[in-house]
Image: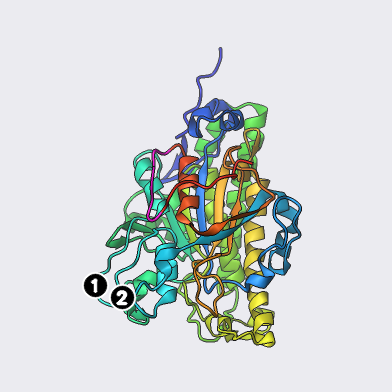
Amino acid sequence: MAMQPLSRRTLLRGLGVSLALPWLEAMGPLTAWGDDSPKAKASAAPNRLAFIYVPNGKNMADWTPTKEGADFELPAILEPLKDVKGEFSILTGLTADKARSHGDGGGDHARACSAYLTGAQPRKTDGTDIRLGVSADQVAAARMEGDMRLASLEIGCDKSSMAGDCDSGYSCVYSSNMSWKSATQPNPKEVNPKLVYERMFTTGSDGQRAHEAAKRKSLLDLVREDAKDLNSKLGAGDKRKLEEYTSSVRDIEARMERVAKLPPIKVPDYPKPEGIPASYEEHLKLMSDMMVLAFQTDVTRVCTFMFANEGSNRAYPWINIKEGHHELSHHGKNPEKLAKIKQINTFHTTQLAYLLKKLKSVKEGDGTLLDHCMLAYGSGNSDGDRHNHDDLPVLLAGGGCGTIKQGRHLTYAKNTPINNLWLSMLNRMKLDVTQIGDSTGTLANLAG
C-alpha cells in the first residue's frame, strides 16, 4: 500500500526537544510553497527572504563593476565570490533617501541602518520616544505568523542596544537594529549561536530549556528513537537526505563545543560577548550556519543578519588591521586607509561567499537551497567618508524559485528607492504588498 504523504510540519521529538526536518520526497510536491509563476512551479520549493547588513559603507571604487550586464569583471572586493559569480547580481543606483538628514543634521550612521529596510525617517531622539516604521522583513513575517515555527529570525554579531546616544543625538536602538515590527518596536537580534540553535530546535519554557541544555550532550541523541522510527518508513533517497541533514546538525554541535574550549583572543576596543566564539570569523560562520539550518528545516523563511552594528569601530587584527573600521572609513582619500578599508570589505565578502556556498551545497527538490532564496547583502551608507546614501553597495543573490536571473550588473536610475527592491522581493514571496516605506514601484529586469 502507498504510504500516506508525510506532513511538512513533521518534527523529530524526544525528552522535551524537537528537531524540524528538511523537505523530503515523502512530503509530496512543494509547489504550493512558492509563488504561482511557471518557473516557481517548476522549482517546486518555498521562497526564502534574507537581508544581510554590513556597516560603514564600502570603498566603492573597489566594489562597482565597470561594465553592465553579464559580461562584467569582479572588482577587488567581490573577488572572493568568483566561485559563485553566476548566483548573484550587483545592483547600482539604489538609494536610501530617508537616511539623508532632511534637516535633522548629523546622524548618518543611525539613519543608514534604520532607514535601510523601512524606507522611513527615524525620529531624532536619544530617549524612549523612538519612532520609525515597519521593516521589509517584518512585512513578510506578519503574513506568515502562525504558519512558521518562527515568523522571522534576527541574528548578528554585535548586541542590540535599546538605549543611549550613539550618533549625534540618535538613540543606539537605530544603529543596532535593522528589523522593526512596528514604528516603536525594534526586534533585537540574537548574537549567541547556541541560543539561536536552541530557539529553533527546543520546546518548553526558558527554565526547561536551560535545564535540558545543561544535561544533554546532543539534540540528536534525544530524538534518535523518533528518527529511527521515521527512517524505517522512508525511501532510499529520503534516507540519504535525512542522514546528510543529521550529519550537518551533528557537525555544528561539535564545532560549537570546540569553539567553547578555544582560548580567548583579545580584540582591541571590542568586549567579548559572553557565550559566543572569541573569533569573529568563526562567529560569522556559525551564524551563517544557523540561517542555513533555519531555511533548510523551514523553521522560518525570513531572516535578518547584521555582520556588525552600523558605525562599528571593530578592529581586525587577524588581517593586520589594528585601527577601527569606522575610523578607517573616514579615509579622506588617504591611500593607506583606503587599502585597509578594502581589506575589511574583502573580509566581509569572504564571509558572504561562505554563506552562499553553504546554501548552494544543500540539495532541495530539483535544485539547491540557494535557488530557493533571495538574499540581499549591502549597507545603508555608500562611501563611508562622504556618508552618502545614493548608489548604495547592493548585492542580490539566489534564484528566488526561478524568478530572478543572476550573474549580472544592473544599473538603475539615480535615486531609485532601495525599497523598490524590497517590494520586488516581497512580491516573489507571494505576498499581496503594493508599497513599503518610500517605494515607488518594483524594479525592472530582475527576471532577465
Query: In this orientation, does residue 177 appear?
Result: no
Q: Is residue 434 magenta?
A: yes
Q: Describe the element under mark 2 as helix, strand or loop.
A: loop
Residue type at mark 2?
Ala
Image coloring type? rainbow
Residue highlighted by disc 2: 163
The crowding category of the residue bearing disc 2, from other C-alpha atoms within 10 Å (few below 14, some 14 to 19, many at least 20), is some
Q: Is residue 226 magenta?
A: no
On the rendered structure, is 142 left or right of 91? left
Q: Give the range drawn in magenta.
A: 431-438
On the rendered structure, is 273 left or right of 237? left
Q: 68 or 243: which is nearer to us? A: 68
Q: Residue furthest top?
A: 1
Q: In which quarter of the image is the N terminus?
A: top right
Where's residue 365, x and y in %?
62, 33
Are the two marked residues, 2 and 1, in contact with CB atoms closer than 8 angstroms?
yes
> Where is residue 349, by image quadrant?
bottom right
Residue highlighted by disc 1: 128
